[in-house]
Image (cartoon, helix red, strand yellow):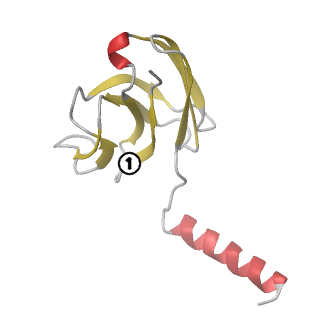
Amino acid sequence: MNRMLFTVAVGALACLGAVRGVQAQVVISLEGACPGTLHVRWEGASPNQRAALMFSQNLGQYRLPAGVCEGTVIGLGTQGLHVVRFFVTGPDGEGELSGRATPHACGGYLQMIEYPSLPCLLSNVVQIPE
């Protein structure tokens, strides 16, 4: 396949993905020390959508029960599972949150979930440094 044809084919696939509602992966990153102040940054989210930052002390494949994101399988386990903070993703679908992490949070995991779209859009899972 020549380069021009390949470029057109890739462009067509990208358009097809957009038409079918395929969304980009939300990526979160973490900076800071634990215990101490942590900064969570995200990019790739839908603009101005409601989101939540979730915490768990273990990894897993937990299926969310009845509610806004019912049936969504997250990458966190159930040990200490809770929402750290609710927020809005920002006009460009990127932003940052800062907060104080207690010793209990060190070694735990964070994941962002964008709602109320179904399926709810998930980020990667990051581990809080110990």
Would you say 70 lies left or right of 122 here?
left
Quick one: quadrant of the C terminus? top left
Q: Is residue 54 shown above or below 97?
A: below
- In depth, the one of 109 and 112 nearer the eye is 109
SS at mark 1?
Answer: loop
- In depth, the one of 66 and 62 nearer the eye is 62
Horizontal and vertical percent for residue 27? Answer: 54, 42
Give the image quarter of residue 67.
top left
Q: Is residue 41 shown above or below 114?
A: above
Return the residue at label 1.
117
Residue at the spot 36% in from the left edge and 27% down from the top edge: 108
Quick one: quadrant of the N terminus? bottom right
Horizontal and vertical percent for residue 55? Answer: 34, 28
Would you say 6 lies left or right of 101 here?
right
Give the image quarter of residue 19.
bottom right
Residue at the spot 57% in from the left edge and 73% down from the top edge: 16
Horizontal and vertical percent for residue 25? Answer: 52, 51
